């Protein structure tokens, strides 16, 4: 399952090239609370479920020499991943696949979802979560869980 992670068409990239986002903030904060106050969703968006965002923030910090830092794998989110041939990877997938995306996502539009669907083929469901932005599981956790359960159940029944 791909959750609100875009694979844009070559035409969309030509119209609107997006440089890789800056990643790998190595800043050290003097106190846990100072670091906690700096936590932000990327891309920025409101989230009514503050308790979930706070939980993630609290569990995303680690003590380091001189204070606190984010648990962050810069290699996993670095610019290298933007050179990967994800279109080809998605088109070559032979297992069950699905796309879940937020209706109000800044990263996956309906056009992008349609393009990704064309790569995955007609057997791969595409589920749009109403009122969700990019952070689908934070914005609409119950709808997200329902969508995941529905997809998994349909895959089990298809065996």
Image (tube, helix red, strand yellow):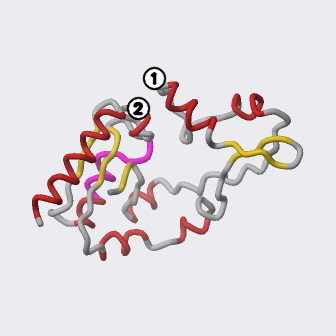
Question: Depth check: 127 or 33 in front?
Answer: 33
Q: Is residue 51 left or right of residue 111?
A: right
**Which residue sits furthest left?**
158
- Which residues make up the magenta segment? 106-115
Q: Quadrant of residue 30?
A: top right
Q: Pointer 1 and pointer 2: residues touching (CB < 8 Å)? A: yes
Residue at 30% over, 40% down:
145
Image quarter (top left, top right, bottom left or bottom right) of the C terminus: bottom left
Query: SS class of the residue under badge 1?
Result: loop
Residue at 35% over, 45% down:
109
Q: Position of residue 130 (x, y in %)?
A: 28, 33
Q: Position of residue 146 (x, y in %)?
A: 25, 39
Query: SS class of the residue under badge 2?
Result: helix
Q: Is residue 40 left or right of residue 137?
A: right
Q: Is residue 40 left or right of residue 141?
A: right
- Spatial CA distance of label 1 from label 2 is 7 Å
Residue 48 badge: 1
Image quarter (top left, top right, bottom left or bottom right) of the N terminus: bottom left
Residue 139 badge: 2
């Amino acid at each position: 399952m791909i959750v609100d992670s875009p694979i844009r068409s070559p035409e969309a990239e030509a119209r609107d090239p997006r440089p890789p986002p800056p990643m790998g903030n190595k800043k050290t904060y003097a106190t846990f609370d100072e670091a906690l106050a700096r936590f932000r969703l990327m891309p920025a968006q409101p989230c009514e479920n503050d308790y979930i965002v706070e939980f993630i923030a609290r569990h995303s910090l680690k003590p380091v020499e001189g204070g606190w830092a984010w648990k962050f794998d810069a290699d996993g989110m670095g610019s290298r991943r933007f050179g990967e041939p994800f279109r080809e990877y998605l088109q070559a997938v032979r297992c069950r696949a699905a796309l879940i995306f937020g209706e109000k996502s800044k990263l996956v539009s309906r056009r992008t979802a349609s393009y990704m669907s064309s790569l995955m083929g007609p057997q791969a469901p595409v589920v749009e979560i109403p009122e969700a932005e990019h952070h689908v599981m934070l914005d609409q956790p119950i709808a997200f869980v329902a969508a995941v359960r529905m997809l998994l159940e349909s895959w089990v029944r298809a065996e």
